[in-house]
Amino acid sequence: MKRDLSEELYKKYFRLNDRKVEITLRNKVVLKGILVGFFRGDEDAEEPCIERWHLADEKNEFSLGLDAFGFLSGTIVKQKDIAEILFFEDNSVMKF
C-alpha cells in the first residue's frame, strides 16, 4: 500500500507554531501563505487522507479563508499537484 504523505503533512503542519509555508507545485508555480483548511479524501475511493488544501494569505490567518462577503479567499491546492512544501518555522522541506 502506498504511503499517504498528505496525512504526514497534516500531522507536521498542525504541530507548528509558525504556520507560514511555501508550496511549490509540480508545474513550478510557487505559492506562499497559511493553510487554513482542507478537504478530506474518500477512503473507499482510495483517495489520500487530505485531497485538497485551502491556502490563504498569511495576513488572513484568522479569517478561516473567507472574505468579507463569506466567499472563499485564497487558493485551493490539490494534494497531487504539490511537489514540495517549505516550512518557515524550522526551514524544513517535505517532498512529494
Image (spheres, grey):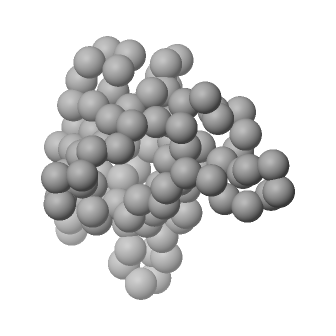
- Number of numbered discs overlaid on the protein picture: 0
Whether residue 14 appears in this view of the structure is no
Residue beneath the point at 62% across and 53% down: 73
Which x, y percent locates residue 3? 24, 57
- In the picture as drawn, the residue positioned furthest to the bottom comes out as 45
For this rendering, which residue is in front, 16 or 81?
81
Which x, y percent locates residue 58? 54, 30
For this rendering, which residue is in front, 60 or 13?
60
Which x, y percent locates residue 75? 49, 55
Asked if residue 85 lies left or right of residue 71, the reply is left
- In the picture as drawn, the residue positioned furthest to the front comes out as 68
For this rendering, which residue is in front, 14 or 70?
70
- In the picture as drawn, the residue positioned furthest to the right comes out as 69
Asked if residue 16 lies left or right of residue 70, the reply is left
Whether residue 6 appears in this view of the structure is yes
Which x, y percent locates residue 63? 73, 40
Residue beneath the point at 35% across and 60% down: 79
Asked if residue 36 lies left or right of residue 7, the reply is right
State which quarter of the image contains the N terminus.
bottom left
Residue beneath the point at 33% across and 35% down: 22
Residue beneath the point at 39% across and 37% down: 32
Q: Is residue 43 above or below residue 51?
A: below
Q: Is residue 87 above or below residue 64?
A: above
Asked if residue 14 lies left or right of residue 65, the reply is left
